[in-house]
Image (cartoon, grey):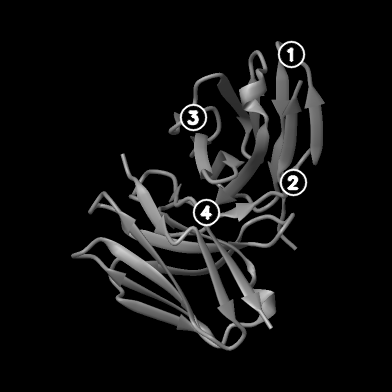
């Protein structure tokens, strides 16, 4: 069964901490994405990547950065966590091209206190 | 950039009834329109998708229609069952970009 795996299901961090959210896929997909999901706001795009070492900003990149050193791994970094970054974070991957759907990870519920 | 509006935000139907969820998109260059179902506590799962060269697509009780002129697309679920209860998201995508999602519709099917 193909998978997108997010390293943590639940995470609690303190304000100001640097936070790493890891995502690994085993489908040899070129494309990887990070979204955050908040009630009533749907899924909002933070960053995405179409290849190793490349990244593109999404709609809400402020306060986040990403790293893609290997094809299978896409990391989301919260440089200095704030309470308004408390959210569900979803990673996804897809085949190249614009006509393919995503496979999502199970999500990481991050609480910043 | 692309913007996707989804309506209604909540929808309650009786088992066996049909349910329709509608989405509009802003950028006429969008060419791919998937629908995702997210059950409580689970990840979103792709249930059906349509490409811009097709007007309608069916998969058992689920169908999606696309009107490129009006820039809207809809999800139709017939003979609804309690297990159809979930949050449904529409999305749109232009070539070379990522999916932009609607805000979701919470569907409740009561028996």
Q: Chain of mark 2?
A: A
**Mark nearer the viewer, 1 or 4:** 1
Residue under pointer 4: A95
Same-chain status of marks 2 and 1: yes
Marks 4 and 3, how far apart in space? 16 Å
Q: Quadrant of residue A35?
A: top right
Residue under pointer 1: A17
Residue under pointer 2: A5
Residue at the (63%, 15%) spot, across then down:
A79
Tag 4 secondary structure = loop
Determine crowd level at label 4: few under 14, some 14-19, many 20+ residues with C-alpha closer than 10 A.
some
Q: Is any part of residue B60 visible from this angle? A: no
- Closer to the chain start, of discs 1 and 4, is 1
Q: Residue A56, percent across and down?
A: 45, 30
- Closer to the chain start, of discs 2 and 3, is 2
Residue under pointer 3: A55
Q: Is residue A96 left or right of residue B82?
A: left
Q: Residue A18, percent across and down?
A: 71, 15
Same-chain status of marks 3 and 1: yes
The reply to whether discs 3 and 1 touch (Cβ–Cβ < 8 Å) is no
């Amino acid at each position: 069964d193909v998978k997108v795996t997010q390293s943590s299901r639940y995470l609690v961090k303190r304000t100001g901490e640097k936070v790493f959210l890891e995502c690994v896929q085993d489908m040899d997909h070129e494309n990887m994405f990070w979204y955050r999901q908040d009630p009533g706001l749907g899924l909002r795009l933070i960053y995405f990547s179409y290849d190793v070492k490349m990244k593109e900003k999404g709609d809400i990149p402020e306060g986040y950065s990403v790293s893609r050193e290997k094809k299978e791994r896409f990391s989301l970094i919260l440089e200095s966590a704030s309470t308004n970054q408390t959210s569900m974070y979803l990673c996804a991957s897809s085949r190249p091209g614009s006509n393919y759907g995503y496979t999502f990870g199970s999500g990481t519920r991050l609480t910043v206190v | 950039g692309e913007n996707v509006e989804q309506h209604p935000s909540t929808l309650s139907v009786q088992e066996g009834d049909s349910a329709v969820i509608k989405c509009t998109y802003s950028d006429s260059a969008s060419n791919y329109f998937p629908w995702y179902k997210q059950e409580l506590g689970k990840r979103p799962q792709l249930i059906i998708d349509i490409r811009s060269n097709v007007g309608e697509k069916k998969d058992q009780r689920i169908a999606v229609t696309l009107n490129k002129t009006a820039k809207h697309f809809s999800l139709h679920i017939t003979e609804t069952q309690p297990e159809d209860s979930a949050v449904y998201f529409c999305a749109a995508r232009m070539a070379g970009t990522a999916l932009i999602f609607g805000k979701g519709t919470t569907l409740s099917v009561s028996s």
